[in-house]
Amino acid sequence: RYWARAMAGYARFAHVRPSRPHLVLARIQQRLGFVHYHITQNVDGLLQQAGLRPGRDLLQLHGDIHKVECMRCGFLDDRAQVQQRMLQENPQAAAAIAEAPARPDGDAEVKDHHDFALPHCTRCGQPDLKPAVVFNGGSIPDQWRELAREKIRAITASGSILVVGSTLTTFSSVSLLRKANDL
C-alpha cells in the first residue's frame, strides 16, 4: 500500500521547487559567507535545489526523499528512476495518479492497490525498498548524527547559531542545540 500511495504523491512532489527563503538561505552562505553549514530536518531537497551541496555545506538530518534505500543490501537508488520503473510496471495505477487526492504527508489516497507491483532493488533484486528518510519515531543513522555533532562543534566555535523555520519539537534538533549550548 505504501508504494502505491507514494507513487501517486511523488508525481506531484517531484515538481516542487525552492521558494524565495530557500534561495536566500543558500545565497547567504554562498555569496556572503555568513552561514558556514546548514543542518535541516527537511527531506524535500529544496535547499539542495537552491544550490547547497550535501556533505560539503548541507546535512539533511532526516534524509532525502529523492533517494530510495534497499533495506537488504543498502544500495541507494534515485527516487525518480524508481518512480519510472513503478509507472512502467503498474500501468493501471499510473492512469489513476492524476485523480488521486493528495494527502498532507506527501503521498496520495489510492483506493485500489492490491495488484500493485512493488519496486525492486536494482542491485540485489529484492523488494525491500524504502525512502532514504528517517520516519517518525525512527533514529537518525549514526554517521549522520556524528556529522551533525562535528558540524555543531564547528558552528559553536564561531559563536553563533541561526535557527530558521523550526518549532524545535523533534528531539533530534533539540538535542543538537543542547549540545551546542553545552560547548
Image (cartoon, grey):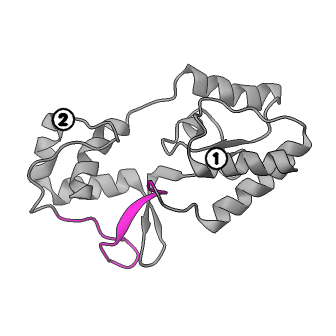
Residue 36, given in percent of the width and then of the height, sits at 80, 39
Vertical placement of residue 11 versus 153, above or below: above
For the residue pair 118 and 39, the one nearer the viewer reads as 39
Vertical placement of residue 74 versus 4, above or below: below
Q: Quadrant of the N terminus?
A: bottom left
Vertical placement of residue 166 versus 71, above or below: above
Cβ atoms under marks 1 and 2 closer than 8 Å? no
For the residue pair 173 and 11, the one nearer the viewer reads as 173
- Could you tell me which secondary element the residue under label 1 belongs to? helix
Image side of residue 93 versus residue 24, left or right: left
* Three-letter residue code for mark 2: Pro
Vertical placement of residue 108 versus 116, above or below: above
Q: Is residue 134 shown in magenta?
A: yes
Image side of residue 138 versus residue 28, left or right: left
Identify the residue shown where x is 52% and y is 23%: 19
Q: In terms of sequence position, does the residue under pointer 1 or pointer 2 come before the other?
A: 2
Residue 178, given in percent of the width and then of the height, sits at 75, 48
Identify the residue shown where x is 36% and y is 38%: 13
* Three-letter residue code for mark 1: Ser
Residue, disc 1: 173
Q: Is residue 13 shown in magenta?
A: no
Q: Which residues are magenta?
A: 117-136
Q: Nearer the viewer, mark 1 or mark 2?
A: 1
How crowded pointer 1 is (Cα within 10 Å; few <14, some 14-19, many 20+) is rated as: some
Location of residue 122 by image quarter? bottom left
Identify the residue shown where x is 34% and y is 41%: 106
Residue, disc 2: 101
Residue 39 shows in this picture:
yes
Residue 123, given in percent of the width and then of the height, sits at 41, 75
Extreme-top residue of the structure:
20
